[in-house]
Image (tube, rainbow, N blue to C red):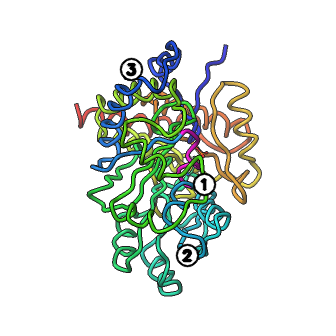
């Protein structure tokens, strides 16, 4: 018997109550019945984003929101600065070029982060960019970026700051209004504990002012159309009705636990996995700026991350992610976001240890588990 345990940084496990909500009878999306759900979700999404702005919900994966915002705030030929320290930072540049924008890309190693210094240099080289694009957490590397500080620099030069919080939001603090971020987005299948299929995006007044200066290149993901229908508490196109039923339940669960408690849980689980990996003698790819979404553990050269992932899922139903691109076989990524309790974190560490032993790495079984237990227990005793 094998259970299914997702420790991937998306999709994440879906709680039973959320899964059940998706099995309700279909209702029509242009009815008062649906509107009631829409309005409740809209309020709760503002709490999740910690913003007074409306949060638009798109039907699509997270990339739909990334594409929508580039279309909305960067006209063809206009300049945009993108940070590329991983697969998702790279995506900003790809979308920009596809939509005819003039992309100034800041590229750096995956063990590094989007620093204020790098931004100041980029602005010196590209002073007339209209916006700066980055990630709250780069999922390819587990690196956290200082988005608030980046926003301050961008604003000083009249640029907007756009934050892809697709994996980071919910797991890590990102209060949009307090940090004066112009655009924040997330997706359903990461910290929100939902199936894939919804993308969420909120924009500041300054970002919305920029939107109206040029024509859209998109039809389906045109944020102007979504804003217009949101004014009537409905979607421009057919709503993801079942996902919305699930969204309401998931948001209630998150807000009942308390956003800060959710973030603390992800943080302490991250601390446990990071410390366990180090106690076992491994280095982490994100040591310079660790985010709390996932831990990227660097493997010895003779061990392939793809094989580790295959071994764990094949024998135990435990899903770790390998790396991407140059790090494809070099890192095992262990997620600690979404619907994950402390004992699942201990299980992830135990499985990782056993896999390392299997692949001939000289480690002591239980050494990482012990460290993880100590951290989780200390937290329990301090908090309760
Ligand atoms: C997952 C992810 C995306 C892409 O989202 P999709 O839902 O796969 O379209 C973008 N950015 C980050 C940081 C992510 O983690």
Q: Nearer the viewer, mark 2 or mark 3?
A: 3
Q: Position of residue 277 (x, y in %)?
A: 53, 46
Residue at the image point whose x is 32% and y is 36% from the top: 44
Residue identifier under label 1: 218
Q: CA distance from mark 2 to mark 3?
A: 43 Å
For residue 274, say whether it is visible.
no
Q: Nearer the viewer, mark 2 or mark 1?
A: 1
Relative depth, front residue between 342 and 78: 78
Q: Main secondary structure of the magenta part?
A: helix
Query: Badge 3 local density, few (<14 within 10 Å), some, or many (20+)?
Result: few
Secondary element at image label 2: loop
Please report whichever mark, 2 or 3, sits nearer to the chain's N-terminal start.
3
| Highlighted magenta segment, given as a residue range | 59-66
Residue at the image point whose x is 58% and y is 42% from the top: 61
Depicted 91 relative to depicted 312: above or below:
below
Residue identifier under label 2: 78
Relative depth, front residue between 234 and 289: 234
């Amino acid at each position: 018997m094998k259970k299914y345990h997702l420790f991937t940084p998306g999709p994440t496990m879906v709680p039973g109550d959320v899964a059940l909500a998706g099995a309700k009878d279909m209702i029509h999306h242009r009815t008062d019945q649906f509107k009631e759900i829409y309005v409740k979700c809209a309020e709760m999404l503002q709490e999740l984003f910690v913003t007074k702005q409306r949060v638009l919900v798109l039907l699509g994966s997270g990339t739909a929101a990334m594409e929508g915002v580039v279309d909305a705030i960067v006209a063809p030929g206009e300049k945009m600065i993108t940070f590329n320290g991983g697969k998702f930072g790279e995506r900003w540049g790809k979308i920009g070029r596809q939509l005819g924008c003039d992309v100034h890309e800041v590229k750096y190693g995956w063990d590094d982060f989007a620093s204020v210094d790098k931004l100041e240099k980029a602005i010196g080289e590209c002073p007339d960019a209209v916006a700066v694009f980055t990630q709250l957490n780069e999922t390819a590397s587990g690196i956290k970026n200082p988005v608030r500080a980046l926003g301050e620099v961008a604003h000083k030069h009249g640029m907007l700051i756009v934050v892809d919080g697709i994996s980071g939001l919910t797991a890590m603090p990102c209060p949009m209004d307090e940090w004066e971020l112009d655009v924040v987005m997330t997706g359903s299948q990461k910290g929100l504990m939902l199936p894939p299929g919804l993308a969420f995006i909120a924009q500041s007044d300054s970002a919305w002012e920029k939107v109206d200066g040029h024509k859209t290149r998109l039809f389906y993901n045109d944020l102007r159309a979504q804003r217009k229908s949101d004014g009537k508490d409905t979607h421009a196109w057919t709503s993801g009705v079942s996902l919305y039923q699930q969204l309401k339940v998931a948001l209630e669960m998150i807000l009942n636990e308390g956003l800060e408690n959710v973030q603390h849980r992800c943080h302490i689980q991250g601390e446990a996995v990071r410390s366990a990996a180090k106690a076992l003698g491994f280095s982490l790819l994100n040591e310079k700026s660790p985010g709390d979404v996932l831990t990227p553990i660097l493997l010895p050269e003779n061990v392939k991350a793809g094989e580790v992932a295959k071994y764990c899922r094949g024998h135990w139903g435990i899903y770790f992610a390998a790396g991407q691109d140059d790090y494809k076989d070099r890192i095992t990524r262990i997620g600690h976001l979404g619907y994950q309790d402390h004992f699942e974190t201990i299980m992830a560490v135990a499985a990782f240890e056993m896999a390392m032993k299997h692949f001939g790495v000289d480690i002591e079984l239980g050494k990482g588990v012990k460290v993880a237990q100590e951290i989780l227990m200390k937290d329990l005793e301090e908090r309760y």
